[in-house]
Image: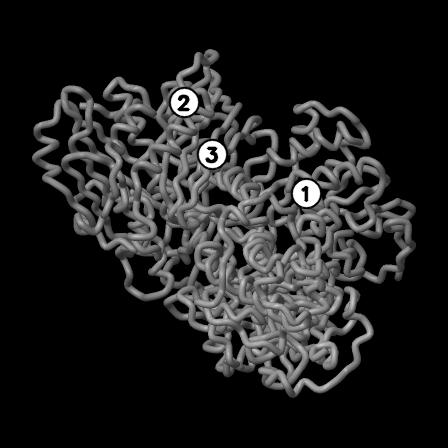
Amino acid sequence: MFLRDIGVIPGATADGAAGLEKASLTNFSPIVGRRGFLGGSGVLVLGLTLAGCNTYVEPDVDADQFDLADPGKSPLTELAQGDATPGMWIAIEEDGAVKITCHRSEMGQQVWTSMAQIIADELEADWDSVSIVQAEGHERYGDQNTDGSRSVRYNFHRLRVAGAAMRHMLTDAAALYWQVEPGDCTADAGLIRNDKSGETLSYGNLAELAAKLPVPAEDAITLKEPDEWRFIGKEVPSLTIPMITRGEGQFGIDVDVPDMVYAVIARPPQVFGRTGKVDDAKALAVPGVLQTVSLPDPTPPALYQPMGGVAVIAKDTWAAIQGRRALEVSWRDGPNASYDSDSYGEALKETSRRKGTVQRSRGDVSAGMAKAAKTVTAEYYAPHLTQSPMEPPSGTARWTDDTLECWGCVQDPQETRNVLSQVLGVDKEKITVKPTWLGGAFGRKSKPDFMIEAAMLAKEVGKPVKVTWTREDDVRHGFYHAVSAQRMEAGLDESGRCTSYLHRTTFPSISSTFANGVTSPSAGELGLGATDVPFDVANLKVESGEAKGHVRTGWLRSVCNVFHAFAVQSFAGEMAHAAGRDQKDYLLDLIGEDRIIDPTAEGAEYGNYGGSPEEYPIETARLKAVLNKAAEMANWGRDLPEGHGLGIAVHRSFLAYVATVVEAKVSLEGDLSIPGVWVAIDAGTVINPRHVRAQMEGGTIYGLSNALYGSITAKNGAIVQDNFPSWRLMKMAEAPRAFEVEVIASNKPPAGVGEPGTPPAGPALANAIFAASGTRIRTLPMIGPDGTRLPLADTNDTDVA
Amino acid sequence: MAITLKINGETKEIDAAPGTPLLWVLRDHLKMTGTKFGCGVAQCGACTVHVDGTPTRSCVLPHDALDGSEITTIEGLKGGAADAVRDAWIEDNVPQCGYCQSGQIMAATALLNENSEPSDEDIDAAMTNLCRCGTYMSIRRAIKKAASNA
């Protein structure tokens, strides 16, 4: 028989397929010459895998790899979401192993597993055969910036198409082999079944033949119906967690390449401070220290440049740390030498008391306030924070002649590659950036400065270099969450209903890190919880103030949503109190009727997280649904013991809707504990509910920890905090005892999950503390690094006139 | 000045500078990177190993003070409690990024080795390791599950 003659099914074990002899492939007009899979070039075997090894494994250069530079003949390169060429995403080996390429960075959000679920579902793979290959940074993959809670929504459709395309090709291959119609073949858990004969062939058997077949066009591909999904929406076992429990897997700090030396860097205490006199004699006397290297002083804007300083190169990390301790450097002041975050914070508050730039306006707020029966005013302040992933930044670089390889915990390997190319003046084609696992990231590892440091040092030293940031480096030399002041004013009518609402927000923009002279927030930042406010009030105005940046300002999990939601949702609680009403009922009324909010209709420039307003409108019905659900879960309105209170907050961010109820227990002295938290999320279509629950727990703890303890301050331009616990994180004993999450079932398009849990946590806690104690906390952190109790005496009641 | 250490039942010859903490001997010299660096000041617990069965923060522990001690790392952690902890960690999807979890597992296993039915207060007292991903609730649930399965 025709196909048996050509014998392209190595290792086949199914009936009739074993023992085939090699023959000509000429009848097939193969689109690839090499063994391998689809789309113009093969990807049967990728040599680099992180699985099961603690040290970096050199890529097997002889193995076929998907050629990212070869566009091939795939008709799937230009889907709306990018390239869905199946060979780029999937390799099937002869033994049936399915290797799925993950182009997003794994940092705890379980993206390895969720990306694999999407592909494996449409592929009809056997889950036990699936493993992951981490993609290097390359534009062919499309967006790789693992940031903004968008891995699933940016890739859901195209990865389904990729998986389905390969299923079609495997099915076609089996049909050719059996000489039946593809419609007579069914893909099922890594096998194709001949529905007429009952015979089966494994994907491994079919791989090489399928590789010779053309990639189908999108309109020839049938995607599965949601009720046929086996992995999407299911609690599929994690691909990373078993490795984690054995101490396996490779983080950036774990990278080890032959002949590598270790570096730590003494950086100027101020941003744009400069390196003065250096005496490295004592550093060089430390056993194991090899040399020191001065890095160039950076010039504004900061961008992703290294911040200069002096590197100590040593035989191990400890020697480098000791060498740095012994190093004598005099630092010279730069333009931020006078930065004092306390006085700066006062200036932000002053700014927010004055009229700012109108960013969204409805009705006439001044006239509405003048007619109000009551006015409510409150000011909220939140300090700088640092992302503080448990793995501090770490990057490793190796030069071979003029080519550069880098490994590290980067959220955006493509941008890392671009920046390396720009800073080092090397053609991008000569740079490879390979993400490892990220030991947490939270926005810090979107900034690849540590990789640039490694590449610069490796070039200077002439050996591979691993740069490790100590915790002190991470705390003192970060890209900080903006310090902010929010002023809220409201006018209430006789019934307590809000008729006028004014929100003024003032904070240094992230844009100030990337361009000189920026003092205004971007529309994108304002759209994170300020200009997208969903309240149904007759008169509404959102204004912004001017603020100059004095440290590197950067993204931190959910970004400006943190302080905007803290102010807006705390203030909703304050209005409810002024109106003498229940927080939850008042909030429901503030949100109002079911409708779609369009901030642009009221003058706002609004980006909606990159989602189209048609696909991802702001729906008040969904906000109210999660609010009601969380309240129901918490048994809102129940009798509480003395000193207990419930607080609620609801917030849409990253296109997802999250409501949080916190129960606080506050003693008369201010001792706080959190007996319970209840969270409801509507994130549209969900790939794995376990992942969503974990992100709600984690996002909430992140928000609670920062609100209670997080504070980065600066004096004379230098960050005051240095390590745990002056930079303090919540611990087990302080974490909520009970925690329940409900994921709302939805077939709407997938929304973000990694960040939306964070914004409502802080205000729900503040509202709970108020309910428990009568104290309204408007200044963060609530307890701080040194405190043990809430400052009950230092705060005031709602300012109602 | 090479000294020998007994790690996971094997004798290892170490040639590191005097006073080098065990953490860096494990990670940089022995390439056993399952034990993590988080703070260097014994605050976060990412570097937790067992020294003669006791959970110990290896980032401030000079390796040359450990002559004669039995050192166990995540790579060599074995036994009924360890198995129960790992199983519970996997069943409950405890880790997120995983970076602190070697230390969390070392601490949880030591707790269960000492106390087969830990109360919430026992868990609070024993589990002082930091987790920025916020897996504390999952860890608490998994410790209880491991205790009932051990």
Is residue A355 depicted above or below A581 in this figure?
Answer: below
Residue shown at the point (45%, 52%) measured from the top left: A149
Q: Which residue is mark 2?
A: A792
Q: Which residue is mark 3?
A: A708
Q: Which residue is mark 1?
A: B45
- Taking A333 as reference, is A50 left or right? right
Specify the amino acid type for callout 3: Leu
Looking at the image, which is closer to me, A727 or A258? A258
Using the rendered image, report if marks 1 and 2 lie on a common chain.
no
Which chain does the numbered disc 2 sit on? A
Give the distance between the C-alpha atoms of the residues marked 2 and 3, in whole angstroms: 14 Å
Give the distance between the C-alpha atoms of the residues marked 3 and 1, in whole angstroms: 21 Å
Tell me which label, 2 or 3, sits earlier in the chain: 3
Is residue A378 depicted above or below A653 in this figure?
Answer: above
* Figure quadrant of the N terminus of chain A: bottom right
Which chain does the numbered disc 3 sit on? A
State the SS at label 1. loop
Is residue A231 depicted above or below A744 in this figure?
Answer: below
Label 1–label 2 contact, CB within 8 A: no
Mark 2 crowdedness (10 Å alpha carbons): few <14, some 14-19, many ≥20: many
State the SS at label 2. helix
Instruction: Say which quarter of the image contains residue A502.
Output: top left
Farthest-out residue, front:
A196
Q: Nearer the viewer, mark 2 or mark 3?
A: 3
